[in-house]
Amino acid sequence: MKAVVYKGPRDVVVIKVPDAKIEKATDVLVKITTTNICGSDLHMYEGRTNMEPGRIFGHENLGTVIEVGSAVDRVKLGDRVCMPFNISCGFCENCERGLTGFCLIANPGNAGAAYGFAGMGPYSGGQAELLRVPYADFNCLVLPPDAEEKENDYVMLSDIFPTGYHATELAGVQAGDSVVIYGAGPVGLMAAYSAIIKGASKVMVVDMHKDRLALAEKIGAIAVDDSDGSGVEQVMALTAGQGADRGCECVGYQCCDHKGHEVPNLTMNNLVKTVRPTGGIGVVGVFVPEDPHAKDKLAKQGQIAFDFGQFWIKGQHIGTGQANVKAYNRKLCKLIAEGKAKPSFIISHELPLDRAAEAYENFDARKEGWTKVVLKPGH
Ligand SMILES: NC(=O)c1ccc[n+]([C@@H]2O[C@H](COP(=O)([O-])OP(=O)(O)OC[C@H]3O[C@@H](n4cnc5c(N)ncnc54)[C@H](O)[C@@H]3O)[C@@H](O)[C@H]2O)c1
Ligand SMILES: [Zn+2]
Ligand SMILES: [Zn+2]
């Protein structure tokens, strides 16, 4: 099969590799029809993780089941399925509680597994023609009859739509709340979309990229252009000096100042500044336990200088971590099926798998107009 293989920093190739196959009776094999590039792939692409060369990327996957393991009960040949990026067993202590992003079985010795991901188990990604799906009965979301027609919407259930929603859950967003979101990448836009679906009264999205901010405006959020570094003041002015009720971090450890220099503690401290006393903060942007290639001394050890005193005195609370996609994907699927949500609005490029290298390069450069790439292995 053809697959997107990581060779080293900023180097991916589409090459022939051995076909993915069923390895355990609880697996299914999926022929991938849509697979997305994610901001999480970029940390690996840039060589800022311990991703091993030779591995296949891709954790946002949708396709058709073409082979079913002998112990699979529910999922059938021909089903169109979307997989959470998390691989989870369904029966461990965390999975039982819905915390499938922290499965204790799928990646022994760690909490949490994923397809094509540094540090999250040996599983191959789905930026390929075929994908092996472990614990298939648990991990496959079988899609409704309009799966093909709305494929570009449903594929967002693999990660960013549930992840954006998770950010709002961690922050505690409820109807009527004002919400500030740092990052207008795919995840930030999905957090804004989720806050709007939940009935937030005011959603402010901070970024420096005008094309991304325009998408935030398109869904009814207020764009806060931080390209002159005035984002924090703008948010305070928009909230009568009080700060927002809730805040979401949708950037992660590679966040930058308005001049483009990495300042790993910037968004976290901006959240402390721009969320009101007793407000909630949800952090889904990725922070890593170590970042040897960081320029900052603390960041090398996965640490940031966090304004804990301000955070404490303001009585804020914070929630972090990988999204438990399965906790939300079925409900969000129904919103798509009923025409209440259309997350495909963020897609800028639909390309054949063969053009993955070019897609990575442009998306990584946050090049104007490259907001979200979906790859189509069948084309
Ligand atoms: N927790 C999870 O389960 C989960 C799932 C998916 C993605 N992620 C993470 O979410 C983050 C965002 O993903 P994405 O696909 O949207 O990535 P992205 O890199 O495309 O978007 C990040 C955006 O943040 C902006 N940004 C940079 N510095 C900023 C700052 N100081 N203030 C405001 N905006 C700033 C960038 O301009 C960019 O538009 C990444 O860290 C990704 O790894 C987490
Ligand atoms: Zn992703
Ligand atoms: Zn589990």
Image (tube, grey):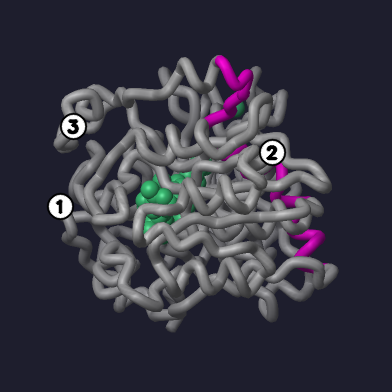
Name the residue beneath numbered marker 3.
Answer: 296
Task: Give, as a three-letter code, the residue at label 1.
Answer: Gly
With 11 as the anchor, is 150 left or right in this view?
right
| Residue at (41, 18) in percent of width and height | 109
Q: Give the Cα distance between marks 1 and 2.
A: 42 Å
Q: Is residue 185 above or below residue 350?
A: above
Name the residue beneath numbered marker 1.
Answer: 8
Q: Position of residue 172 (x, y in %)?
A: 71, 35
| Residue at (23, 24) in percent of width and height | 298
Q: Nearer the viewer, mark 3 or mark 1?
A: 3
Q: Which badge, 3 or 2, is on the more N-terminal residue?
A: 2
Looking at the rendered structure, which numbered label has been put on residue 152?
none
Whether residue 250 is visible here, answered yes or no, is: yes
Q: Nearer the viewer, mark 1 or mark 2?
A: 2
The one nearer the camera, 233 or 281, is: 233
Q: Secondary structure at mark 1?
A: strand
Q: Give the Cα distance between marks 3 and 2.
A: 31 Å
Q: Position of residue 272 (x, y in %)?
A: 51, 31
Choose top left, top right, bottom left or bottom right for residue 79: bottom right
Q: Secondary structure at mark 3?
A: loop
Q: Is mark 1 within 8 Å of ligand 1?
A: no
At label 3, counting other C-alpha atoms closer than 10 Å, the crowd grade (few under 14, some 14-19, many 20 or more) is some
Extent of the magenta region:
313-337
Choose top left, top right, bottom left or bottom right for residue 12: bottom left
Looking at the rendered structure, which numbered label has been put on residue 245?
2
Task: Give, as a three-letter code, the residue at label 3.
Answer: Asp
